[in-house]
Structure formats: structure tokens, C-alpha cells
Image: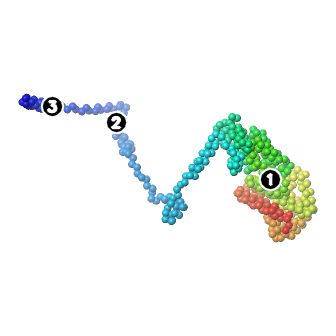
Amino acid sequence: MSDILNVLQDLKESMQEGVKVEERPKPKRAKKKNDPAMPFSDDEIRDLEKEFLNHEAAYADPNFTKKVEPALKQARQPSRKARIDEEKGAIVYESYDDSKVLDALQDIQKTLNRLDKKIALTAHTDEADSIRIDESPQPVGIVKLLIAEIGSGESITYQLQTKEGIKEISLSEYYEMSKFVSMLQQYRYTMIVDKTMDFENDLFDIYRDKLLIVSQNILANSFRFFEKSTVLDELMILGTKIKETASLTTRAIEDIEIIFLNMKEALTLPEYQKDLFFAKLLNERGFILNAITIINEMLGAYLVESARELSPLAASRIQNHLDRIELTRSSRKAYYKLYRSAKEFFTSHFNGEEGEDAAAFFPFKDSGNEEIEQLMSKRYRSNKMSKRDHFHLYSDLINRVQSIRNDLAHGNNVRAYRDITSDINEVLVDFEYLAVQKNFLQVQE
């Protein structure tokens, strides 16, 4: 058996040596045909890309480096507190506290929440007493935005807080009240009324028309109009009616009524004190040309009023002249002439200098001229030196006012507004001291 196995093994080995296994050649990649429309092969395209597009720069991975500031660049200066601490041996930089920013954002959010659907009006609460009138009710601009956003139909209502409780009003009615309050605020600070502002509420319209009459006469320096007119009383009565029907307007109307009450009180004062009130009123609101015009006549009015106190003859002559003025058509011009003549008389007699020609008190020949001159000069000489200085100061005041008025009356005035207003404020203070507090011409020491 072993012999048979050996024979088979020898036969197998002889067969393996006689058979040669041929290796199959690897298939070659078929050459891609060129597109007739593209004369370059893919390899040629890649070579061209490398050549024209700078293959390595365009396709290489970017290399990021840390940017170093130039050594010569000036370092950021620390705060003053940091420099002080540095001198002590340690630099301490203040940390930023963002709590204020958060508080401000919260305040803004609260405001937006208030205006989201309705405006909460608190015109008659304790909290509202510390709020200025121009902050309650809401500005007209905000109301316009609300109307544009949600409409102004009768179905759109506001919950208005009143003394009697919550009251439902239409958005259009609330807009009317806000617009009316805005007009009153404008008048309070400017003495000007917007004639184009119309109201559906008849009471608002009538109030605006009467307020316009007041404004026109004040700006025309026609104060004597209010002595004969009842327009101020009519406005007070009308304001009471409006406050009863539209409580939101109460505070704005009451602020205007303070001006009316002060005007009515000023109209009962002597002419020069009445002029002082209106000069202050207009000067505070920027009408400096009106103010200096009133002041110029106010100085003469004080002299005329004081001359009445010199003697019965002087009082009689002055009153007769004033009565004649009232009968003339141009009474304003006649008053101006009298006041100018009185000022020229005073400055020519009591300016502290001698040798000037003395002017007459009246702008015409009258026996009162000599009477007033003698008595006024006697009062000047009988006073102590401190009281005589008041005569000199008043004479200087007349000249200062005349200079300011001449500057403002010309269109080519080059003086700054604040300089002129500063001069006018000083004049008003000086006049009030000499004529009202000291009353130097009517009170002897």
C-alpha cells in the first residue's frame, strides 16, 4: 500500500512541473476621447490651472499667524483712577456695572406694556401730583400712533381715571382732549395760539378763539384793551365748564388761569407797575423787542406818576393832559410823547453833570412845567447823598434802555441774543429796585 502512495505522489509532482500557468495581463485604461469642442485634455486643463491660477497659492491650506501690534503704537491710557492706584503701587481697573442698563431696559419694557393696548391715565392720583403737565396726558404724537394702529371708531374706548372713578371715553374724544391740552401748553410757554387747530368740541373751539384775542393784544402791546374788555372773565367762565366736562384738561386750564389772574391784578396797579408785569411776561417768553418797548415807556410812566405827588397843581396839570390824550384818535402816540418828554426832562436835570440845557416836563408850554421843575429839584437837593445817587442811577437807566431799544429797532443789529436778554434782565431788576422797592421819587428820607 505504501508503494502505491509513493507512485501517486511522484506522478503529481511531475504534472505540476510540466504545466505553466500564464498570468493574465492587466487591462489598460481606455484613453478618453477628447471633446471636439474642447481641444485640451483633462490633464492639460489641470496643468493650465496650475500655471495661470498659481495652484499652490490658490489651493494650499491657509496658514494663520497671530497679528502683532507694532511696538511703537501708543498703549491705551488707563483711567484717572487707574493712574492714581498705579502710583500707589497697584493698577486696579474698574469693573463695568451693567445694573443700570438692566434697569433702563426694564423701564422701557414697562412703558411698552403701558402702551400695548391702552394708556393708563392717572391724572387724579397722588402719584400724578409729582408729574409735570406735559407728561400727563400722553403727548398728541403717541395718541396719533395709537389711532393709526387700532383706528378711532366709537367702539375703541379708553378707561379714563377721573375724580369720580373710571370713565369710558372714545379714542377720538381722548385725542380731542390731548390736542386741546397741547394747545394750552404751547400758549403757556409762548403766548402763541395755533389758529389752524380745529376741534369737534364746540367749547374747545370757543376757548381757542378767545385765547387768540388775548394773544394778539398782548403781542401788540395793547394792554389797555383788557381794561375795557371782558375776555379774561369769559375765558375763566368757559374754562370752568370745560373742566366739568373734560377733567383731563383741568391742570392745563388752571395753569393758564394763573396768567389771567395775574393779568387782572396787574391791570389794577399804577401804569408803570402794569408795564413791569407785561415786560417780564414777554421777556421770559423771548419777545425781547416787545419787552424793551414796554420798558422804554415804563420809565416815563413812573416819572409822570411821581410828578402827580409833587403838588395839587402838578397833579391837576397832568390829569388835564391825560384827559385830552384820551379824546384824541392817536392816544398811544400822545402817551409816547408825554413819556419821552418826561424822560428828557429828568436826564437833563439829574444826570450828575452840570452845564446841559434843561428840558421841560410837558412837550408844550404850560405853567406846570415850572412847578414840576422847581419841586423835583427841591426834592433832589433835600435828600441825602445816598438818595441822590438814585436820581443818577435812574437817569443812567433811561440812557441804557434807549441804547438797547435803538439796537433792536434796526434790522442790522449784530449783538447776540443772550447779551441783549442779559441787559434787559438787569434793567428790569434795577427798575424794580428803584421804582417799586425804594420808590425813590415818591418817598423822601
In which image quadrant can residue 166 be found?
top right
Q: Position of residue 368 (x, y in %)?
A: 91, 62
- Which residue in the protein does label 3 denote? 20
Q: Secondary structure at mark 3?
A: loop
- For image coordinates 73% across by 50% down, the residue present is 189
Neighbourhood count class around disc 3 (C-alpha, 10 Å): few under 14, some 14–19, many 20 upward? few
Q: Is residue 366 left or right of residue 423?
A: right
Q: Secondary structure at mark 2?
A: helix
Of mark 2 and mark 1, the one earlier in the sequence is 2
Residue 258 in view in this figure: yes
Q: Nearer the viewer, residue 364 or 120?
A: 120
Q: Secondary structure at mark 1?
A: helix
Q: Quadrant of the N terminus?
A: top left
Q: Amino acid at mark 3?
A: Lys
Q: Nearer the viewer, residue 123 or 229?
A: 123
Q: Nearer the viewer, residue 161 or 319?
A: 161
Q: Amino acid at mark 1?
A: Asn
Q: Quadrant of the C terminus?
A: bottom right
Residue 426 badge: none
- Which residue in the protein does label 2 denote? 42
Q: Are marks 2 and 3 in contact (CB under 8 Å)?
A: no
- For image coordinates 26% across by 32% down, the residue present is 28
Q: Position of residue 155 (x, y in %)?
A: 69, 34
Q: Position of residue 55 (x, y in %)?
A: 36, 43
